[in-house]
Image: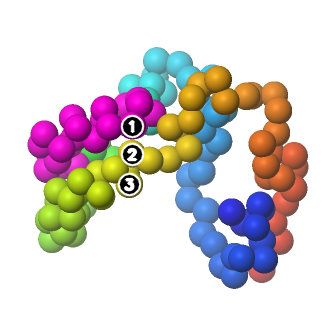
Amino acid sequence: MCLDHPARVSRAAVLDIVPTRHVFATADTVLAMAYEHWFFHAQPPGFPEHLIAGDPEFYLRAKLAAWSAGGHPFDETAVEQYVTHFRDPAAIAASCGNAARRPPSTWSTTTPATPAATGSTARCS
């Protein structure tokens, strides 16, 4: 967004952003196990949502526990809020709906898809 539409962005924080198509093109077993949710959420729409909706609290707590494996668990009050909202099918759908949902045939690793992929840069201040 910052590179593709800089006039629309006044401030941004970039946190651990990895180009999805690069990850899928170069993934190995270690990455696939650590980021299994990327592959799970990339399944056809409706599939991961249906499975998560079967026990959304279990799914969410398992993911949060894995992400806090460094001995820094999430605050339980915050987790309860996430669990409350994650019971909403729209929240589950939103968590699954990212760029990885595009068909693999569109994941070109040689053709730039955006100005960011062509080497455009953002000005930091």
Which label belongs to residue 102? none
Mark with earlier residue (3, 1): 1
User: Does residue 106 appear to the left or right of 72 in the view shown?
Assistant: right
Question: Badge 2, how many Cα within 10 Å: few under 14, some, many 20+?
Answer: many
Q: Quarter-wise, where is residue 14 in the image?
A: bottom right
- Residue type, mark 2 in image: Cys
- Answer yes or no: do the residues labelled 2 and 3 have beta carbons within 8 Å? yes
Residue lying at 44% horizontally and 47% vertically, measured from the top left:
97
The spot of residue 23 in percent (x, y) is 60, 31
User: Which residue position is annotated with label 1?
Assistant: 45
Q: Nearer the viewer, mark 3 or mark 1?
A: 1
Mark with earlier residue (1, 2): 1
The spot of residue 17 in percent (x, y) is 60, 51
- Residue type, mark 1 in image: Pro
Between 70 and 120, the one lying in front of the other is 120
- Answer yes or no: do the residues labelled 1 and 2 have beta carbons within 8 Å? yes
Count of number-bearing discs: 3
Question: Badge 3, how many Cα within 10 Å: few under 14, some, many 20+?
Answer: few
Q: Nearer the viewer, mark 1 or mark 2?
A: 1
Q: Is residue 92 visible?
A: yes
Give the Cα separation between the discs numbered 2 and 3: 5 Å
User: Which residue position is annotated with label 3?
Assistant: 94
User: Which residue position is annotated with label 2?
Assistant: 96
Give, as a single range, the part of the protein colored magenta. Answer: 40-61
Residue lying at 45% horizontally and 33% vertically, measured from the top left:
42
Secondary structure beneath dot 3 equals helix
